[in-house]
Image: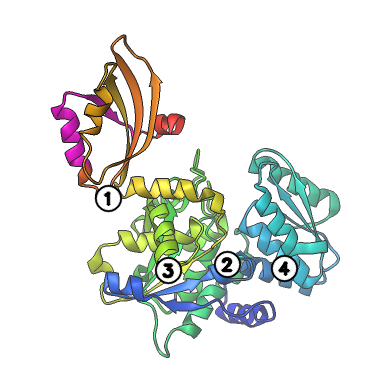
Amino acid sequence: MNNQDVDNATQAMRGLFPPTPLQFNEHLSARHGAEIWLKREDLSPVRSYKIRGAFNFFRKVIGQGGADRIFVCASAGNHAQGFAFVCRHFGVKGVVFMPVTTPQQKIDKTRIFGGEFITIRLYGDFFDQCYQAAREHVEATDGVMVPPFDHPDIIEGQATVAAEILEQLPEGAVPDLVVMPVGGGGLSAGMTGYLGGLLSPEAFVFTEPAGAPSLRRSLEKGEVVTLPKVDNFVDGAAVARIGDLNFAVLKAFSPEQVMLMPENAICVTIAEMLNVEGVVLEPAGALSLTAIEAMDREQIKGKRVVAVVSGGNFDFERLPDVKERAMRHAGLKKYFILRLAQRPGALRDFLNLLGPDDDIARFEYLKKSARNFGSILIGIETKHPDNFKQLIGNFEGAGMGFEDITENEILANLII
């Protein structure tokens, strides 16, 4: 990748949208004793950086006389929306394949961005089925497949994020650390390629969801690894296999430079940014900020840190789940299975074990496990994690049978 080509792409992109803001964040800077800047890709026209790679890909194909071909993509998320927006901008026809299970909100947003220039086809229950249908359509129509990340023109388009950062920092300033999320690797390959001649390799910090560590596992093995399964909660970065071209750029980095963020920790960031900063982030968009929270304070103290906030396409129907996960990660909510005696006054005796800041958020009889005892699912919220130490001590002192199932993913997913 040539930096001059990236600069040319950046200038061409100005005909589509202005640079996304690079904002100094007072709140995070004060907390960490650092100079923390947020590159707000959630403020692009489609609320993610994906529009950049799509624009650059289309620009190159159209520049080579391909405006009459049908452009095709397979996506249920940000790539589809960027694709649709660019189709309308260039006035070319596009077909978006989405799984049948795609939420209606995402279908509607994609249709709004593309208007009359796109057709949406719902196919299959899973992405692999949808992707295969898109490939077959490309072959049947001599169309153009627009990949989400594994293509030189996509990488070059995503690198425009780095070009803007250098233009927007105070004159003469460069980052000490650049923190960026990784899914398929298009953004990280582009940014490290553009900034690699200016910053040391150690200046780059990558972050993936713990349930989809495709870059980390590939770096550990020294070759591209396909994960057998992924946790799809961080849907914008839950990729089972990093792009081959992208890994070729990133393979020189150390596995230790890839921070794996628990999905519940990401929820803490989403909730805090919404409540404190009024910023709406999708899970992938919160990855970089979650990584900053997890860093050793001495690692970033006094440094100039740029964190890429990659997207803000958050479905507010997910908010209750995000709040739940955030409280559990912060130690403010726990679930227990209790063995409660079936006698008058037993519930009152249990309530007397609760502290003044403990609140029952859920109470449900599961079954009568014995003639004199019943099994109860109870969810308890409190104001400080240490309160649970006292509560568990009270349970033990009263001889109450219980099991903490908060971190038991299998059991929790079945009954919570």
Magenta part of the protein: which range?
Answer: 388-407
Per the model, the C-alpha gap separating discs 3 and 1 is: 21 Å
Where residue 89 appears, as percent x and y from the top left, is 75, 72
Per the model, the C-alpha gap separating discs 2 and 1 is: 37 Å
Q: Which residue is mark 1?
A: 383
SS label for mark 3 = helix
Camera-near label (3 vs 1) is 1
Where residue 209 appears, as percent x and y from the top left, is 44, 51
* Residue 78 appears left or right of 334: right
Per the model, the C-alpha gap separating discs 1 and 4 is: 47 Å
First in residue order: circle 3 vs circle 2: 2
The three-letter code of the residue at mark 3 reads Glu
First in residue order: circle 4 vs circle 2: 2
Where residue 409 appears, as percent x and y from the top left, is 40, 35
* Residue 21 appears left or right of 125: left
* Residue 246 appears left or right of 33: right
Q: Which residue is mark 3?
A: 277
Q: Which residue is mark 4?
A: 86
The three-letter code of the residue at mark 4 reads Val
First in residue order: circle 1 vs circle 4: 4
Q: Does the rendering let one see residue 319?
A: yes
Q: Which circle marks residue 49 in the picture?
A: 2
Are the two marked residues, 1 and 4, in contact with CB atoms closer than 8 angstroms?
no
Are the two marked residues, 4 and 2, in contact with CB atoms closer than 8 angstroms?
no
